[in-house]
Image (cartoon, helix red, strand yellow):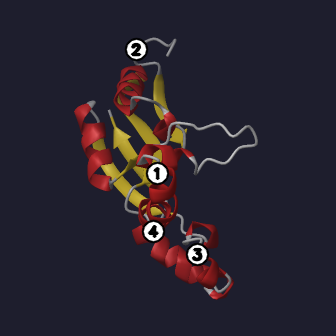
Amino acid sequence: MPFDDASFDVAYSNGVLHHVPSIEQAFSEVHRVLEPGGDFYVLVYNKNSLFYRITLAIWYQIIHGYRHKETLQEQLSRIEFNEADERPIVNVYSKRELRALLQQTGFKVSSIKVRKLTWEDLPAVWFVHRFFKYIPRSLLHFLGKAVGWYLIAHARK
């Protein structure tokens, strides 16, 4: 990044850094531009989310993986829908992996929370999908704290 060392007191990334080829390099750059004691908030995809575990790791693997012989990384690139049919880099992390990556780049991790479970995050299995609208949002919000699609970390330099 074209900024001097210790230029900022806060850095925030909302759903971007899981698309870069090297999140380690990105975290190192954030660490460099933060002043001592600076806060870093980052949101990435959760490897232990219901969406990932069922829709991607199981459903796509069974339905699409064997038929099309796609790698999991190729399947992951399909979750980012766009009109141009681009295939972006998509990475997912567990809480443990995210904590280790932040610590390896010099951050002290204050918290990592799991959030976001909506009807759209539930498995797209045709015979049960129509019943999702009957699940109360309050229940989805509660479950999202355990199996949601996002990891939200707060770390300090």
Whether residue 150 appears in this view of the structure is no
Q: What residue lies at 37% left-to-right and 62% top-to-bottom?
A: 48
User: Of marks 2 and 1, which one's residue comes earlier in the chain?
Assistant: 2
Give the residue type that dot 1 points to.
Answer: Tyr
Q: Which residue is depicted at the point 58% across and 75% down? A: 125
**Marks 2 and 4: which is nearer the front?**
4
Kind of residue sitting beneath label 2 = Asp
Residue 54: mark in rendering:
4
Which one is closest to the eye, mark 2 or mark 1? Answer: 1
Dot 1: what SS? strand
Classify the position of the C terminus by image quarter: top left
Mark 2 highlights which residue?
A: 5
The numbered disc on residue 45 is 1
Q: Nearer the viewer, mark 1 or mark 3?
A: 3
For marks 1 and 3, the one nearer the N-term is: 1
Report the front residue among 128 and 25: 128
SS state under label 3: loop
Residue 32 falls left or right of residue 14: left
Are dots 4 and 3 in contact, CB under 8 Å?
no
Badge 1: how crowded within 10 Å, few (<14), some, or many (20+)?
A: many
- The dot on residue 125 is 3
Residue 57: where, in percent of width, then height? Answer: 42, 60
Furthest toward the front, the residue is 67
Disc 4 or 3, which lies upstream in sequence? 4
CB contact under 8 Å: marks 4 and 1: no
Q: CA distance from mark 2 to mark 1?
A: 28 Å
Q: Residue at x 49, y 42 (%)?
A: 90
In-image side of 21 versus 13 (left or right)? left
Please rate how many residues cluster around mark 2, counting C-alpha atoms within 10 Å: few if below 14, some from 14 to 19, many from 20: some
Quadrant for residue 54, please give it: bottom left
